[in-house]
Amino acid sequence: GLDRATFLLAAGQNEPLRPMASIASGGEKARLMLALKMAPVMTDDYASTRANRELASGGISVFDEVDSGVGGRVGARIGHALRRLTTTGSQQVLCVTHLPQVAACGDTHLIVSKSPDDDADGRTTIDIRRIDSRDSRVEEISQMLG
């Protein structure tokens, strides 16, 4: 398209609007993206309009540390918003998180860990492990709590 949009953001109550790209952190940008994806889901007539149904026709949303820089209470709200996006918005959501409040809202959990690989000249090996049982999920989320 020919149109260009610039999102403006006020970093505080008495701050002037500035281009988001130049002042927002990665977490703030991810939370704005979550808000934009949630906006149609939050309307009363979401499921009844054709445009909204097409908007919700599947798709995958990826959020990398959308909870960066927030505490547990806000993290829980983010987790519930991500969950609602999957149920009401018919989206598949992949989320990288370090907050147990966000992780607790997920259906499927993968643990991603990095370690030095002795056989690969000091390069890093990445291991991905799926948590299948409810007990394992509870244990992992408990470990995330510290």
Image (spheres, helix red, strand yellow):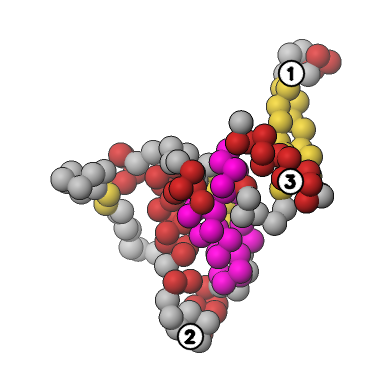
**Disc on the earlier residue, 1 or 2:** 2
Quadrant position of residue 111: top right
At x 34%, y 41%, the residue is 24
**Of the residues shown, which amino acid type is indicated by label 1?**
Pro
Instruction: Give the structural element (helix, strand or loop) at label 3.
Output: helix
Check residue 17 in the rendering and tell me which mark sits there, or answer none.
none
Check residue 116 in the rendering and tell me which mark sits there, or answer none.
1
Instruction: Give the structural element (helix, strand or loop) at label 2.
Output: loop
Q: Nearer the viewer, residue 134 or 87?
A: 134
At x 60%, y 64%, the residue is 86
**Of the residues shown, which amino acid type is indicated by label 3?**
Arg
**Disc on the earlier residue, 1 or 3:** 1
Check residue 49 in the rendering and tell me which mark sits there, or answer none.
2
Quadrant position of residue 40: bottom left
Residue 91, percent from left and from top: 60, 65
Instruction: Give the structural element (helix, strand or loop) at label 1.
Output: strand
Magenta span includes 88: yes
Q: Which residue is mark 3?
A: 137
- Magenta part of the protein: which range? 77-102
